[in-house]
Amino acid sequence: MNTSLRFPRGLYGVSPEWDDTNQMLAAIRAAAAGGMSAFQWRRKTAAPDERIEQARQVVQLCRDLGVISIINDDWRLAALIDADGVHLGRDDGSLADARLALGPEKIVGCSCYNEPALAERALLADVDYVAFGAMYPSSVKPDAVRALPEHLRQAQQIVANAEGARPAVVAIGGITAENAQAVVQAGADSIAVISGLFLAPDIEAAARRCTELFI
């Protein structure tokens, strides 16, 4: 089995829809102290100027902390602020265009929902990870399609034949420190967590519990 990954193994934090930049930066520091290896900045409602400024501060803090920074939905913004990469959903543009624009050194990840065939196609665009979910009911996306542990196992078979470091398999959707072990055992190299991390009473402790599942 190819264990060398193109995206960090472990906890992948995803931002809540927070306007307060100081709150977000403090939460990132706490999660990083608990072992978070990557962070996705995901804002759907902010005004353009606010988006750029908050994202820029997030990327700089992640760089200072040694945490991989990913921008949700928008490879142009990722390029503008020199983030480490981008995450694209089904309606967020071409993976091939994102790879061409960002270059070979940046990270490109994508949502595959509950469709392993999307992962097969994504590999043709040279992605670094494929994400499946929602694994559990999600308060952030209550209408999201549900993925199964079997989809993670199928994804591992799809990425297994990559030459050199292989794309990672990411699980997302309703994941908490309490229910994450099942998806890790099913084949998730990384778990993307929003509410279960950043709305936890103790962010650092929640991050540590998630991180320990990968030790």
Image (spheres, rainbow, N blue to C red):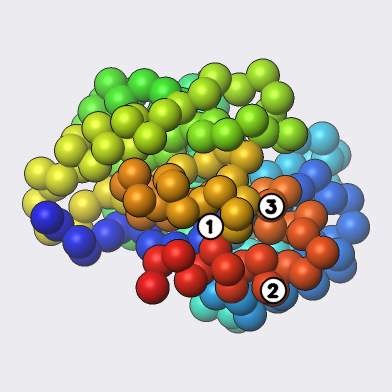
For the N terminus, the quadrant is bottom left
Q: Position of residue 169 (x, y in %)?
A: 35, 45
Which residue is pictured at 66% across the width and 66% down the height? 206
Q: Is residue 33 above or below residue 196?
A: below
Mark with earlier residue (2, 1): 1
Kindly tell me whether residue 195 is visible in this rendering: yes
Give how far across and how far down residue 30 sits, in percent.
71, 74
Q: Is residue 69 left or right of residue 7?
A: right
Could you tell me residue 183's position as x and y percent?
43, 45
Q: Nearer the viewer, residue 48 or 109?
A: 109
Q: Which residue, given by chain and number where applicable, does mark 2 sit on? A: 204
What mark, if any, has residue 196 been given in the picture?
Answer: 3
Front tag of 1 and 3 = 3
Q: Residues within 10 Å of mark 2 (few under 14, many from 20)?
A: many
The extreme right residue here reads 20
- 3D distance between C-alphas at marks 2 and 1: 13 Å
Q: Which residue is mark 1?
A: 12
Q: Quadrant of the C terminus?
A: bottom left
Question: Is 110 situated left or right of 20 in this image?
Answer: left
- Report whether 123 appears left or right of 53: left
Check if mark 2's residue and mark 1's residue have beta carbons within 8 Å: no
Task: Report how far apart the C-alphas of labels 3 and 2 lie in the structure.
Answer: 12 Å
**Residue type indicated by callout 3:** Gly
Q: Is residue 202 above or below residue 145?
A: below
